[in-house]
Amino acid sequence: MLNLKKVQKLFLLFLVASIFIFIPLESTNAFINLLIPFVGDAVESEMGKAISSGIVYVISWFIGIIIGTIPNIGASILAFVLGSDFINYSGAENEVVQSGWEIVRNLANAALIIGLVIIAINIILGREEGQAKKTLVNFIIAAILVNFTPVICGFIIDGSNILARSFVVDGISGDILTKIGEAQTAAQGVQDVGRAVGNLIFILIFSIVSFWVYILYSILFVARAIILWILIIASPIAVATKVFPKSNTIKKFFPSILFWDEWVENFVQWCIIAIPAGLFIFLANKSMTLIALSPLTSTSDDTSIITNTMTALFEYMTPLIILIAGFFITISSGGAVAAPIGNLGRKALDTVKGAAVNTAKSAGAAAGTWTKEGVIGTAGALAQKKNPIYFDNRDSGRMSVENAKEKVVGWGRRNVKERLHFGKDQDYKTRSEKADKELTEKPEDYLKGDNAADVEKEVEMAQQRISIAEKQGDKEKVKKMKKALGLAMLNNKNISDERIEQFEKEFEVQMGDVINKMSSSETSKNLKDSALQRSSVARSLDVKQVKNIFRNGSTQQQNALLRGAKSIDLSKNPIGTAEYDRDVNAKTMIIGALRTNILERKRGSSLGAPTVAKSLNTALKDVKKEIADKQAKKYINTTKEQRVAIDAEIKTLKDKELDLKNKRAKL
Amino acid sequence: MKIVNGNIISFLGEIILTYRLEKEIIDKSFNYLENSNKLEKALSLFFNDRVMERIDKGENPEDFHPLLRLRLIIDDLINNNISYEDLPLLIKEKLGVSLLIANEISSSIEDNEDIKKLRNEEDTEEIEEYLDSKEAMVKEKTIGYELLK
């Protein structure tokens, strides 16, 4: 029975949704403008106007103090760190750097002498002489370079500074600050209370964002200067480590930036980090100047709220978006070394974003959420052929829409670089090397993605690599790669059984045999729940493997194996055929071996197995294990006398075993 | 540890169906007709949507499935952890049937030749596993390994 109230509710929901969804922006704008006079009646009178102007003035005065101060502070700090006095101070001519460097150089020379002694000993003893002579050449180069590192580092730093400074020769543009001042004055002059307060809040948020962006860039440049000092100081030791082999022991003596590889990586990244930062500040300056020359915002009261807000949003946000995007691109070019500053930026942006979103939410949450969810739920329920009148059906509809949305958004959320196939991770060489390495060394890392199209691409890449290895005639490698790819495909839920069959056919590999040859512990380690729920896998396992999964596997693996066994279709093969027998055996074996930890506990307590029988069985098992132990130890580094003694012990244990068996039989 | 074979599973399934203990664990699709063999029937007592749903919800099959509960008792029996005399009380307790029915089930289990045979067989699996692990511990190329090979 349809409930009348629910019908009314649905009709209202439809009506409100239609207004917001089907009526175009202009009409919505007109609708809002239509509402404003009703609300504004109260302030239409002269007295009302005076009061409203007073309120706006007081609010704008408070906000104005904040707006007028914080972006200026941020801009001044950034202007200082971009100035030639500061940016050039990151060079080697600094006194702190010079004294620190001298101490480290002396230490590096000492380390080099130890290295020379090791090389000499190796040459004298004739041990790995060729390698020692090669190292001697490195030693001579390092010994010379150690004394010139400040000059070399200074040359590279100066190069990057010149490039960065060419972008930011004028520091940060003040145009945006002028715009903020103008906007604030305009807001105070607006008679419409709603618009004035709205504009002021918007400018306030904008000021906070711009302050943070300036501060983040400032932190980046200050950190760059200090870290470059430290790197110059550490440079003699880093150069000296080139003489030593790349072993873990050496890395323990020279951790982090004291070791050549890490030092070079850090040094190059911190030098060039200033260039993209400079470029984006330059672009932001340009956009500010252009906007200042041709302002988009109209201060006239005649302009509608939506048009005014949209143009203001575009006008103010363009330079800031360039700066924010530039900041994150700069940080990503700085690699792991700049990550902490990047995190600081992300946190700050999240805070500002959160504040803005919360303000917006408080204005429109009630009506918006109710309408949106109602419409989405209704549409989803109808798509599922369910009656949208009922709440549960709408909820189910919302869930289906959410799933569909996640699918689409998930697709769009993927890395743009991956989609366009550019960047160093996306070139063929890197991808093929990655495939080779993972298939031969880390098969558990292969095909970890959850996007079907990407997974298929990875499979194709792996197949190409296997074909190439086949042509090269490396049979062992081919075998390893086929096994790794087959298992990875089984473990990935995006790959269908048909696709796996196609792979088996194409590469003449039977994954059933591969699985069957695994040890029981390998089975529970290598087969994830996505693999175990395939009927083809469930029917390939032997009793030891199944037992191991029920004994050591996770609950997900155990349940997946049960689902896999369930999906074995007995009607597929006629009774009496080998295939039918195999399928029936697989299902039977799984019922026979099924047990969980909880089950084991219960068996011990509630099933109440008689204590005597249980202790006899335990004792018997212990004796058997002891016999096996003795037999295994008998031939390992033992004398003849010891072996005779072990034989005697084994005999005693066997008598004990027989005795226990007899006792058990009597029960 | 010894585990039950297809014949025993088929026999246990028959017991469940004879004493109508399957009501909570099968769905409408279960076929009572004789167009499938006994083992298939016993298997479908376990591998059906209703049981899988309960397992997916986190229930342990041994908590609700009579076939599995009966199999656990038989596990203890074939591994000599219990004797035939223990069966009636255990069956009564675990399957929730009367003592009369428990006695009937016990005597049919006592008559089952597959269970008897399995009960008298030696369980070598655990020792084999133990020895395998021991062998893995002996490093290759040692004198001990060469001698044991």
Image (cartoon, helix red, strand yellow):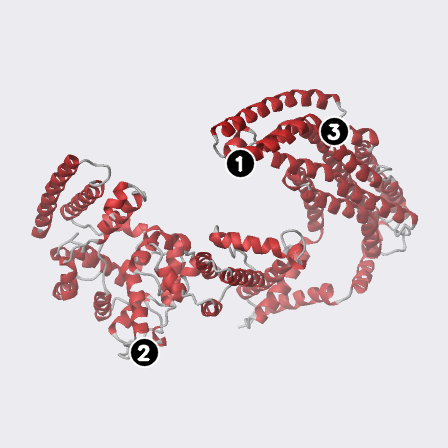
What residue is disc 3 on?
A151
Q: CA distance from mark 1 to mark 3?
A: 33 Å
Residue type at numbered disc 2: Pro
Local packing at callout 3 (Cα closer than 10 Å; few below 14, some 14-19, many 20+) is some
Q: CA distance from mark 2 to mark 1?
A: 70 Å
What residue is disc 2 on?
A574
Residue type at numbered disc 3: Val
- Up-down relation of residue A191 to residue A130 (above or below): below
Residue B14 visible in rendering? yes
Q: Is residue A88 left or right of residue A251?
A: right
CB within 8 Å, label 1 to label 3:
no
Write down the quadrant of residue A618 in the picture.
Answer: top left
Local packing at callout 2 (Cα closer than 10 Å; few below 14, some 14-19, many 20+) is few
Disc 2 or disc 3, which is closer to the eye?
Answer: 3
What residue is disc 1 on?
A130
Residue type at numbered disc 1: Gly
